[in-house]
Image: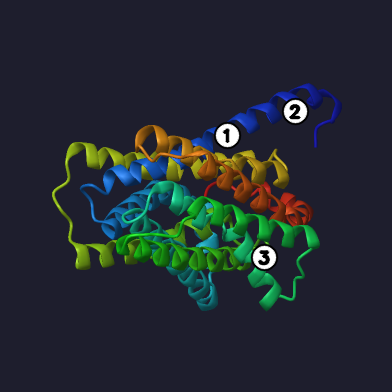
Amino acid sequence: MPPVAPLVPHHGHSHLSALLQALLVTFLWSTSWILIKTGLDEIPPLTFAGLRYVLAFLCLLPFALRPHHRRQIRRLTRRDWARLTALGVVMYTATQGAQFLALDRLPATTTSLLLSFTPAMVALLGMVFLAERLRSLQWVGVCLYLVGAAVFLYPVDFPAQQIIGIVIAVGGLLANAAAAVLGRSANRGGQLSPLVVTVISMGVGSAILLVSGVSTQGLPTLSVSSWAIVGWLAVINTAFAFTLWNLTLRILSATESSAINNTMLIQIAILAWIFLDEQLGAREVAGLCIAALGIALIQLRTLGRLGRWGRRERSDQVAT
């Protein structure tokens, strides 16, 4: 390892660069919600999601075919394949399918608010199945989120289509939480590269998603603008953005990464207001801010645990 002293000035520059790159990634991910809402005018939701992630899988596949990763893939056991298949079905087929279906029926800001409860759901599942007790501050965070969500959604008077969308979004929330637990299991121990985990699970999940979409919703003739949206979402907002995010994890702490990621709830609301004409009053803005604070408090214990073991894995994270 090189001496530490000569790297100190460079480290400060690298840290600032990593912060800016992480902010760029969250901005790209936030724009995904706007692009998805726009693309849903022409592309059926499941087909749309399948096209996005199949194309993203094809972008990442060449990196997974490098000799080191091919050796890992050849050593996969039946249990490994079963676990990665399950991860793909939950993380991509169920979670992303539900997100696109919910966005087809709900405003982007509402969908984002509902799905942002994922860290709390993961913590609650950990309490039930892993005997991981929540700290008092985390319970405060859960309560704050629920208060914020109630303030944002009040008065509860939704059209039938939006009620269906909320039910779908809650299903996506549960699937997303389950995916987080499965992903932790698949990456635990550092035996598999995160790139291998991502490519295999994404390949399986996206293929099922695309087949399901085309068989039930069809594949319409897409305009050039629709193909451009699909391509941008797959190449830039998925393959490139997740790769860049994992590179920033080599420098940023778990707390910093989570804090930056939590800004997406507000970013999506602002972008939806600008580009989708989703109007927000003072009550909705207050609800979003309260919910975002609650999510930040919920993640505190998880971040402490990640800080202890996450650095051991970051040097191997290339893309997800």
The residue most toward the left is 221
Which color scheme is applied? Answer: rainbow
Q: Nearer the viewer, mark 2 or mark 1?
A: 1
Asked if residue 261 is positioned above or below residue 16 in the image, the reply reads below
CA–CA distance between discs 2 and 1? 18 Å
Picture residue at 44% right of the left edge, 45% below the top: 238
Residue 73 point in image, percent of width and height: 50, 63
Front position in the image: 79 or 262: 262
Tell me the CA gap for discs 3 and 1. Answer: 25 Å
Q: Check disc 3: other Cα within 10 Å, few if <14, some if 14-19, many if 20+.
A: many
3 vs 1, front mark: 3
Q: Which residue is mark 3?
A: 123
| Residue 32: % across, % down | 41, 43
Residues under numbered marks 2 and 3 in contact, where contact means CB atoms less than 8 Å apart: no
Q: Please state which of residues 218 and 164 is positioned toward the viewer in this rendering.
A: 164
The residue sitting at 40% across, 59% down in the picture is: 157
- From the image, state whether disc 2 or disc 3 is nearer to you: 3
First in sequence: mark 2 vs mark 3: 2
Secondary structure, mark 1, is helix
Q: Secondary structure at mark 2?
A: helix
Residue at the spot x=18%, y=56% of the render?
Answer: 219
- Secondary-structure class at tag 3: helix
Q: Which residue is mark 2?
A: 11
- Please, what is the three-letter code of the amino acid marked with disc 3? Ala
Which disc number belongs to residue 23?
A: 1
The amino acid type, in three-letter code, at marker 1 is Leu
